[in-house]
């Protein structure tokens, strides 16, 4: 999205890159050098000005996913089939001739079908139905696959097809797509399947996708030699039990339907290796799937599954299967979630957390408060219902804002605090919007603290409450509750606690069943905190040998769930070798960073100085901290040409008058101008990066900045869109597109 008319040559040297996104530019051709990207697997050149498919991309033989949509391409060349690894091609919104629109609009995921389409497009017409029937009757040895797409066959055509298939023993795969076998014509499919089964037992692969099927014929059970069955992209409300008769079935695909449950008869498919039931309405994943010894792949994404933690489902098939196998050994019911208390300094967040812990419903399992700089975590266990809350009180000091995103998650209730005595509507809306944008499914409670204050007029308090009520209405249904409270007198705390419990019990993961081995691993984590706040994963695996030596899949699945509960932190995409068993340790490490007295006016430290702060840890751990904090934007690393050293910029420590000539070496002009004017810099999330930005009303959206960086060790040139710096009000009034963009990054409306 940079308006590029050509591809920078520097990109062509990235020979290790696997995914390249050049969409939304003004490209018309691809340079020859693109062939040097020999490891490229995903290429997106959509929303450009291509009039033909660049032949040079055919040299990228590892390409799996190609997006050519929203261009001006009118011919899809057959040479595209030379990409042997290609799995998906997106060509919609192009004036391509000879390809059915129904295929163009959904993308081509079937390369066999693409061969048929291209054969027709390039002067080798697909065999007409009548001719195909003749070839079938002749038992043509070369005709092992038959694709009939958009033929709209009636009973007569189906009868002819069945008669022809009776004489054919070579056909192995049959594809019937877009045949409109919907009510009242589903009897056509009944007739076809019931007639086909006794006549032809050679068919091993049957594809009935995209047929608007609302009823699955029980005759399907007669095709006993089927190895794969694909009934995806229909409107089936259930899987017919007759499928259990397909004893040779290895692959069953039924995604994008309206299936609500998985029938127990599936248990009888002992040869099943893969089952895809994604994009349905399945609520329960049955336990018997874990008993099927040959089942290697279970795909159930995009279903409202209630009996498996969503953290497990979101991490893929391997995690799901490990979870289900451990459930067979033993399970227990748990009620657990996080309470996240956010807001600016001075709003009484810590007092509120203490008041909640003193609540009469608190059970004996609650832990005493332990205060750490930047974050304050307690555990609170209720008696009835027996919910265990992990209460997170975030420091309102703005220097910690960039670290908060490390701990925030979807499995939580968020409480946004604001003082009724000294309200800051802008900051409060900032927090509400931050949560609403990043965690749209999480409930939010807005609590107006200091309700016991007697020095403030009742009329003023009423006015403040009304303004916050309007604000909460604006963010409904994210905001579920508004109350005036006092941690000192207990005013409103009972209602707050009742609301917390009610909202907690409404969450889909409350309660949930987890394998007992997960709790064993969790207890081991608590014990390890006294040894070290961070462990290498290899060491963690060895430690677990004395609890039954769980396999790698079990450990990673348990760690994934503990990560989302805030018990551990594991960022596999940053460094899979380290597990943080004490999350607060990261804040302590950051506190060492901001407590340093070695800062220049530009908040720059030499990397060696930063690493010296963490000298009690190994070199690998120090590198992990560097990578982690840079990943979350806590600081930024760059190479100083003048000093010939690696240096670190810590934005939250910038003085009010930094040396802009120094910052100009790695900040774009828009950022410098914004900082010079005293305004905040917005990143991909609405987290302020610097200090002293009271009453600021200008922003520099990063999406307005065109970056063209060269990392030869010398410079980083950045160009800026004209008018990138503007009043916040003008950004909000700049039309629907601008408003939507700001909605996405969480800029509060004024």
Image: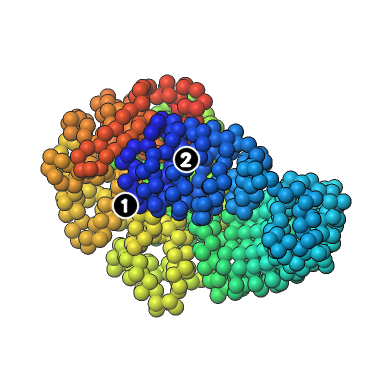
The spot of residue 366 in percent (x, y) is: 43, 60
Find disc 2 in the rendering and name its residue.
54
Indicate which disc, 2 or 1, sits on the residue closer to the N terminus: 2
Q: How many marks?
A: 2
The spot of residue 298 in percent (x, y) is: 59, 63
**Residue at 35% over, 31% down:** 705
Residue toward you, 602 or 251: 251
Find disc 1 in the rendering and name its residue.
628
Near mark 1 (Cα within 10 A), the count class, few <14, some 14-19 or many ≥20, is some
Q: Quadrant of the N terminus?
A: top left
- The answer to whether 544 is drawn above or below residue 186 in the figure is below
| The disc label shown at residue 11, or none | none
The spot of residue 578 in percent (x, y) is: 33, 62
The spot of residue 96 in percent (x, y) is: 60, 36
Would residue 213 be found to the left or right of residue 722 on screen?
A: right
Kindly indicate whether the residue at mark 1 contacts the one at mark 2 (C-beta within 8 angstroms). Answer: no
Would residue 98 be found to the left or right of residue 296 on screen?
A: right
**Residue at 29% over, 52% down:** 627
As measured in the structure, the alpha-carbon distance from the residue carrying label 2 to the one carrying label 1 is: 39 Å
Residue toward you, 494 or 220: 220
**Residue at 70% over, 59% down:** 143
- The answer to whether 163 is drawn above or below residue 374 in the figure is below
Label 1: which secondary element: helix
Q: Quadrant of the C terminus?
A: top left
Near mark 2 (Cα within 10 A), the count class, few <14, some 14-19 or many ≥20, is some
């Amino acid at each position: 999205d940079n308006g590029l008319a050509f591809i920078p040559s520097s990109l062509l040297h990235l020979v290790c890159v696997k995914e390249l996104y050049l969409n939304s530019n003004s490209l018309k051709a691809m340079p020859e050098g693109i062939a040097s990207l020999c490891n490229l697997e995903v290429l997106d050149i959509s929303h450009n000005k291509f009039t033909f498919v660049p032949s040079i991309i055919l040299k990228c033989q590892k390409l799996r996913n190609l997006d050519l949509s929203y261009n001006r391409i009118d011919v899809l060349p057959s040479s595209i089939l030379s990409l042997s690894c290609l799995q998906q091609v997106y060509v919609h919104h192009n004036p391509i001739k000879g390809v059915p629109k129904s295929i163009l609009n959904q993308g081509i995921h079937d390369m066999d079908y693409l061969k048929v389409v291209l054969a027709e497009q390039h002067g080798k017409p697909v065999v007409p139905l009548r001719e195909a029937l003749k070839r079938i009757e002749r038992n043509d040895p070369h005709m092992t696959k038959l694709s009939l797409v958009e033929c709209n066959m009636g009973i007569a055509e189906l009868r002819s097809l069945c008669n022809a298939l009776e004489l054919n023993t070579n056909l192995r795969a049959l594809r019937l797509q877009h045949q409109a076998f919907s009510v009242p014509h589903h009897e056509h499919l009944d007739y076809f399947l019931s007639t086909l089964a006794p006549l032809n037992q050679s068919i091993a692969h049957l594809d009935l996708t995209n047929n608007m099927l609302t009823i699955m014929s029980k005759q399907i059970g007669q095709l006993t030699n089927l190895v794969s069955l694909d009934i995806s992209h229909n409107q089936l409300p259930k899987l017919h039990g007759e499928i259990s008769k397909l004893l040779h079935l290895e692959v069953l695909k039924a995604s994008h339907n309206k299936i609500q449950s998985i029938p127990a008869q599936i248990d009888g498919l002992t040869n099943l290796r893969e089952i895809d039931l994604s994009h349905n309405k399945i609520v329960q994943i049955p336990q018997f799937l874990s008993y099927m010894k040959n089942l290697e792949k279970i795909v159930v994404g995009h279903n409202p599954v209630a009996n498996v933690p969503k953290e497990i489902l979101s991490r893929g098939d391997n995690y799901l299967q490990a979870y289900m196998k451990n459930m067979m050994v033993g399970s227990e019911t748990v009620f657990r979630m996080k309470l996240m208390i956010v807001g600016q300094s001075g709003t009484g967040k810590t007092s509120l957390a203490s008041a909640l812990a003193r609540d009469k419903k608190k059970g004996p399992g609650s832990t005493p408060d332990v205060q750490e700089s930047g974050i304050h975590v307690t555990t609170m266990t209720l008696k009835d219902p027996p919910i265990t809350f992990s209460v997170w009180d975030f420091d309102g000091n703005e220097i910690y804002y960039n670290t908060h995103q490390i701990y925030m998650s979807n499995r939580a209730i968020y409480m946004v605090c604001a003082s009724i005595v000294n309200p800051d509507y802008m900051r409060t809306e900032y927090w509400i919007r931050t949560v609403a944008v990043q965690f749209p499914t999480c409930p939010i409670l807005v609590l107006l603290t200091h309700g016991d204050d007697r020095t403030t007029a009742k009329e003023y308090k009423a006015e403040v409450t009304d303004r916050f009520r309007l604000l909460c209405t604006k963010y409904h249904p994210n905001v579920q509750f508004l109350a005036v409270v006092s941690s000192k007198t207990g005013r409103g705390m009972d209602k707050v606690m009742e609301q917390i419990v009610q909202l907690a019990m409404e969450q889909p993961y409350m309660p949930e069943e987890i394998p007992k081995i997960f709790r064993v691993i969790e207890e081991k984590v608590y014990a390890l905190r006294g040894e070290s706040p961070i462990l290498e994963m290899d060491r963690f695996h060895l430690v677990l040998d004395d609890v039954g030596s769980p396999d790698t899949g079990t450990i990673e699945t348990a760690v994934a769930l503990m990560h989302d509960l805030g018990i551990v932190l594991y960022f596999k995409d940053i460094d899979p070798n380290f597990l943080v068993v004490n999350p607060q340790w990261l804040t302590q490490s950051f506190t060492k960073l901001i407590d340093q007295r070695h800062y220049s006016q530009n908040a720059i430290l030499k990397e060696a100085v930063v690493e010296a702060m963490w000298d009690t840890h190994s070199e690998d751990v120090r590198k992990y901290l560097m990578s982690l904090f840079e990943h979350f934007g806590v600081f930024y690393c760059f190479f100083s040409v003048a000093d010939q050293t690696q240096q670190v910029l810590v934005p939250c420590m910038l003085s009010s008058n930094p040396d802009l000539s120094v910052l100009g070496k790695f900040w774009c002009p828009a950022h410098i101008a914004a900082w010079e004017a005293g305004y905040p810099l917005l990143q991909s999330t609405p987290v302020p990066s610097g200090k002293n930005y009271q009453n600021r009303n200008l922003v520099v959206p990063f999406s307005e900045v065109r970056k063209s960086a060269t990392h030869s060790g010398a410079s980083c040139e950045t160009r800026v869109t004209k008018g990138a710096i503007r009043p916040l009000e003008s950004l909000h009034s700049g039309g629907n597109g601008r408003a939507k963009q700001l909605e996405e990054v969480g800029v509060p409306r004024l």
